[in-house]
């Protein structure tokens, strides 16, 4: 009798433990987010690596091999990561960081609009991110003591970093058991201008060079890539070449673009290019060029070439000998971040 009772007790305990074990596993399974119905939006990012948009010029088809570089060499690299903003229908937004490939984007069930841009920029300032329609990017102020304004009153700035963006107007996030893939194409919001200063005479006297491009867009809107109406002067460094000087300059493009008025009204815009050189003898010389026709036909990246620049032998040899290009005195750029209204 005692043996039967002991056996029954042991069997009862075993059943209780068995129920508890399976009950816990069931609870864990159904409570675990990965195995239960929840919002599982998986962003799959692709990158459009374009450095210019063809308008009046078709550079990919008409590339000049004498420029010493290939068209595809100017294509930007993909970014290191993505910042994702999730805007709720009732107002408010959340921020998350994803890898360059994408990943799971946390959000609540419901309808959202989504804004994406790369999170590895250094010189770009982001403004008014509380709504996707107002979210914009601009760049930092840069001053140069020797610079003479090309356009009166224009803010002088550093070139922006490479900026990509994407916008999803409406995404319905629902609770599912399986992941839902969301393809996102990250498209350029900044473009590259290859700027060539080609000398007719005196290139051998140039030790250092830098430039500025006036009339360019101050800002770009992240939602659709259109640029703001205000213009700035973009300052940049150049490399000294056998033919003169060269620079690769990032820009948001021309102001107030695109717009229905652009094609008919673009002749009213004016764009100017500056070149400042320091010669081997330590003397400075500045050149200014009207590049309106070239920039007007290339509102989002392209090639700007100015030719027949001259430094006379008298200018290049004036003074006593040469100067050390490594010493101070060229006048370093000073980046100053100012409050933006």
Image (cartoon, grey):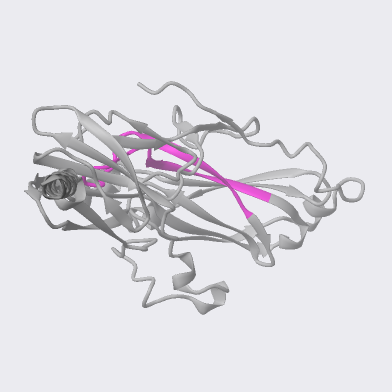
Q: Is residue 179 left or right of residue 205?
A: left
Residue 260 seen by the camera: no
Residue under the image location 65 percent in, 33 percent down: 146
Answer whether residue 221 is magenta in the image: yes
Instruction: Judge by depth and name the residue closer to the eye, 162 or 43.
Output: 43
Q: Is residue 228 left or right of residue 156?
A: left
- Quadrant of res 202: bottom right
Instruction: Judge by depth and name the residue closer to the eye, 207 or 223.
Output: 223
Q: Tell me the magenta residue range.
A: 209-238
Whole-percent x, y for residue 139 in the image: 44, 36
Whole-percent x, y for residue 218 in the image: 37, 37
Q: Is residue 339 above or below residue 197?
A: above
- Quadrant of res 327: top right
The secondary structure that most of the magenta stretch takes on is strand
Residue under the image location 28 percent in, 28 percent down: 128
Q: Is residue 301 above or below residue 10?
A: below
Q: Residue furthest front?
A: 1
Whole-percent x, y for residue 328 in the image: 79, 38
Instruction: Judge by depth and name the residue closer to the eye, 331 or 116.
Output: 116
Instruction: Judge by depth and name the residue closer to the eye, 271 or 311.
Output: 271
Whole-percent x, y for residue 191 in the image: 39, 54
Residue under the image location 48 percent in, 33 percent down: 140
Residue 309 seen by the camera: yes
Q: Is residue 102 above or below residue 256?
A: below
Q: Is residue 288 left or right of residue 266?
A: right
Answer whether residue 76 is magenta in the image: no
């Amino acid at each position: 009798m005692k043996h039967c009772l002991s056996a029954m007790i042991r069997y009862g305990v075993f059943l209780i433990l068995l129920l508890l074990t399976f009950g816990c596993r069931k609870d864990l399974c159904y409570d675990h987010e990965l195995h239960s119905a929840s919002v599982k939006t998986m962003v799959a990012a692709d990158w459009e690596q374009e450095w210019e948009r063809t308008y009046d010029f078709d550079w990919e088809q008409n590339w000049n091999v004498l420029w010493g570089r290939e068209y595809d060499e100017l294509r930007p690299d993909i970014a290191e990561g993505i910042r994702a903003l999730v805007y709720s229908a009732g107002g408010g937004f959340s921020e998350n960081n994803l890898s360059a490939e994408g990943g799971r984007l946390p959000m609540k069930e419901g309808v959202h609009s989504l804004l994406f841009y790369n999170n590895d920029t250094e010189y770009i300032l982001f403004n008014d991110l509380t709504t996707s329609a107002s979210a914009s990017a601009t760049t930092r102020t840069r001053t140069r003591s020797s610079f003479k304004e090309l356009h009166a009153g224009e803010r002088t700035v550093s070139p922006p970093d490479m900026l990509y963006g994407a916008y999803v107007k409406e995404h319905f996030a629902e609770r599912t058991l399986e992941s839902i893939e969301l393809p996102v194409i990250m498209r350029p919001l900044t473009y590259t201008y290859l700027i060539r200063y080609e000398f007719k005479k005196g290139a051998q006297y140039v030790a250092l060079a830098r430039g500025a491009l006036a009339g360019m867009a101050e800002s770009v809107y992240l939602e659709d890539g259109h640029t703001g109406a205000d213009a700035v002067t973009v300052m940049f460094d150049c490399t000294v070449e056998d033919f003169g000087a060269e620079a690769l300059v990032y820009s948001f493009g021309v102001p107030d673009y695109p717009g229905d008025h652009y094609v008919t009204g673009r002749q009213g815009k004016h764009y100017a290019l500056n070149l400042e050189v320091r010669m081997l003898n330590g003397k400075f010389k500045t050149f200014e060029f009207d590049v309106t026709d070239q920039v007007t036909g290339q509102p989002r990246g392209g090639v700007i070439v100015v030719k027949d620049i001259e430094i006379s032998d008298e200018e290049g040899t004036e003074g006593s000998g040469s100067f050390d290009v490594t010493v101070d005195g060229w006048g370093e750029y000073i980046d100053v971040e100012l409050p933006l209204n």
